[in-house]
């Protein structure tokens, strides 16, 4: 593998970060979204388009990734549902103008259904796609949501179309984001919107922390910037027309987990502090100006 994974680019690539972990086993990687894994595969960058991606993205199959997500059981996420609800409520307020009772909505990567439960009462119809059987069952049983255990490619075969497609912190997980965006464009209605969140690798904080950036995780296969996302969307007839900062509301426990990744030398201190149970219920507003909401519209074809 010597060229960019984007077949519409095929620029030369070079090694960006090497964490010296060449003997890891893919089966040992935890794909739970709240994992605090320290395993970090190599990160490469395309010298032409500046897209960054994990070594895993170059040598694992889509089916292997999908199978890993299918067996995810994220009990930490469930224990922090109340904190997640606060964040998703704040996110919904920012994008609520994109929804109304006439809109059909698809959420890709609906996980445990927290955001879907907020969206559903405000739209004509809501559907979610979630590979984790545990996550989708939780969403169905606790929120009575319509969730499909299938990939976006499988879902598109049903010839369905949507007015709004939502993804929160999902695009970096796709084993093939190029194909995913191509399919998303096809299942969006003519005036449809794609709204998604992810981190910006060109943000000041990401540049300052560099190889220790806390969003460099084993299950994140691609690492985007505003520039690479705009280019990738345009290649698939989607135009990003607005980018907004996306501050997070997290638990103190979750914050400590991330601090362990940024400052591994002080891991023992964070582990001690995490034992103070009363701190787990504290909500922390975090804004490092590295997380964004992206609004993209389907471009008309003439």
Image: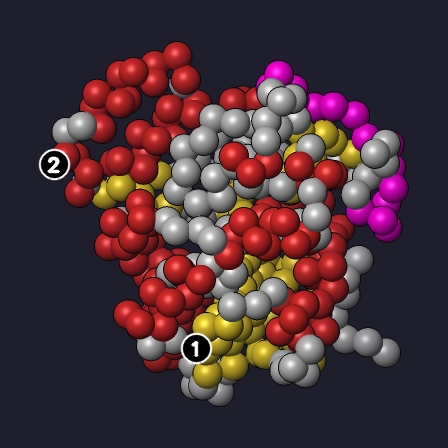
Residue at numbered disc 1 = 146
Instruction: Look at the magenta stretch and give its main secondary structure.
Output: loop
Range of the magenta residues? 6-20
Please tell me which residue is depicted at 51% across the width and 68% down the height of the picture: 149
Estimate the spatial distance between the alpha carbons at disc 2 and disc 1, rounded to whole Å.
35 Å
The answer to if 12 sits in the magenta stretch is yes
Nearest to viewer (mark 2 / mark 1): 1
Left of 184 or right of it: where is 195?
left
Q: Which residue is situated farthest in the top direction here?
A: 265
Q: Which mark is residue 119?
A: none
Q: Residues within 10 Å of mark 1 (few under 14, many from 20)?
A: some
N-terminal of the pair, mark 2 or mark 1, is 1
Please tell me which residue is depicted at 42% across the width and 65% down the height of the picture: 136
Res. 66 in view = yes
Res. 83 in view = no
Q: Which residue is situated farthest in the left direction here?
A: 278
Left of 152 or right of it: where is 48?
right
Please tell me which residue is depicted at 62% across the width and 16% down the height of the picture: 20
As helix, strand or loop, the secondary structure at mark 1 comes to: loop
Q: Which mark is residue 278?
A: 2
The answer to if 202 sits in the magenta stretch is no
């Amino acid at each position: 593998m010597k060229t960019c994974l984007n077949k519409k680019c095929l620029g030369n690539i070079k090694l960006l970060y090497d964490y010296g972990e060449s003997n890891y086993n893919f089966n040992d990687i935890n794909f739970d979204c709240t994992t605090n894994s320290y395993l970090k595969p190599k990160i490469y960058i395309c010298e032409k388009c500046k897209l960054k991606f994990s070594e895993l993205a170059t040598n694992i199959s889509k089916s292997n990734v999908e199978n890993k997500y299918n067996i995810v059981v994220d009990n930490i996420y469930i224990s922090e549902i109340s904190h997640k609800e606060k964040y998703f409520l704040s996110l919904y307020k920012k994008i609520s103008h994109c929804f109304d009772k006439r809109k059909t909505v698809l959420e890709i990567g609906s996980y445990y259904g927290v955001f879907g439960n907020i969206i559903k009462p405000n739209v004509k119809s809501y559907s979610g796609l979630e590979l984790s059987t545990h996550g989708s069952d939780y969403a169905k049983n606790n929120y009575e949501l319509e969730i499909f255990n299938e990939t976006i490619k499988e879902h598109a075969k049903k010839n369905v179309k949507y007015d709004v497609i939502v993804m929160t912190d999902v695009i970096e997980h796709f084993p093939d984001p190029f194909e995913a965006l191509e399919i998303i464009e096809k299942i969006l209605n003519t005036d449809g919107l794609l709204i998604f969140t992810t981190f910006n690798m060109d943000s000041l904080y990401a540049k300052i922390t560099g190889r220790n950036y806390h969003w460099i995780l084993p299950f994140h296969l691609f690492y985007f910037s505003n520039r690479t996302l705009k280019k990738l969307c345009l290649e698939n007839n989607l135009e990003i027309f607005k980018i907004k900062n996306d501050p997070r509301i997290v638990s103190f426990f979750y914050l400590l987990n991330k601090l362990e990744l940024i400052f591994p030398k002080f891991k023992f201190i964070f582990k001690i502090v995490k034992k103070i149970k009363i701190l787990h219920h504290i909500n922390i507003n975090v804004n490092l100006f590295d997380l964004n909401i992206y609004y993209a519209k389907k471009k008309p074809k003439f």
